[in-house]
Amino acid sequence: MKIIVLTLALLVEPERILLGLKKRGFGAGRWNGFGGKVTPGESIPQAARRELLEEAGITSSNLDKRGVLSFTFDGSDDLMQVHVFHLDQFEGEPSESDEMRPQWFSLESLPFDQMWDDDRHWFPLFLQGAKFEGQFHFSAAQKLLNFKLSPVSSLAFE
């Protein structure tokens, strides 16, 4: 099994959250946080900052790691290990890139119907400030088949 290490950064303000509409590639057409693959020689937080700049045009130095999520898909030997970061301060103006179109959403009206199926399960823990770990298994058609999610006191990959 090949492990692919990825990041996901979510900018949260008291009443709203910045999500991006994925315009191309894996997850196209879904709202998500900002992130991607960790490149060789790059730390996980460095990758999160780089992806935030590339996809949304903003920078932040106050990344707070909240979760580690593992994803598998029927028909694939890959395990996607996603390191989830919270940030509440940033510099720059969120702007569209060739990959993502940023948009603010009220915390009360998140577009779960246009997000990955797993998001509705871990987002409440994330927004409460909890640390969490989860495993999610999807069909080849990207439908959630089963999952395990737990709040934790510390993360295995901190």
Image: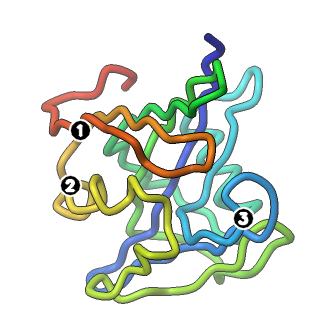
Point out residue 29 in the picture as x, y percentages from the top left corner.
68, 72
Q: Dot 3, crowdedness within 10 Å: few (<14), some or many (≥20)?
A: few
* Residue beneath disc 2: 125
- Mark 3 vs mark 2, foreground winner is 3
Q: Residue flagged by tag 2: what amino acid is it?
A: Leu
Element at badge 3? loop
How crowded is the residue under tag 1: few (<14 C-alpha within 10 Å), some, or many (20+)?
Answer: some
Mark 2 lies on a secondary structure that is helix
Say left or right for 144 vs 93.
left
Which picture quadrant has residue 106?
A: bottom left
Please name which of the two marks, 2 or 1, marks the residue nearer to the observer: 1
Residue visible at 68% across and 33% down in the picture: 38
Q: Which of 22 and 40 is in front in this view?
A: 22
* Quadrant of res 76: top right
147 shown above or below 126 = above
Q: Nearer the viewer, residue 60 or 139?
A: 139
Looking at the rendered structure, the kind of residue marked 1 is Leu
Q: Mark 1 points at which residue?
A: 149
Query: Residue drawn at (69%, 38%), measured in percent from left and top?
Result: 37
- Find the distance from the CA under tag 2 to the CA under tag 1: 10 Å
**Earlier-in-chain disc, 1 versus 3:** 3
The percent coordinates of residue 155 (x first, y second) are 28, 27
Q: What residue type is labelled 3?
A: Ala
Number of the label disc, if any, that sits on residue 28: 3
Q: Where is residue 131, by image quadrant?
A: top left
Q: Nearer the viewer, residue 80 or 16?
A: 80
Q: In this view, does 117 lie above or below 43?
A: below
Q: Residue at x 46, y 62 (%)?
A: 10
* Left or right: 4, with 66 as reference point: right
Say the numbered circle drawn on residue 71: none
Label 1 near label 2: C-beta < 8 Å? yes
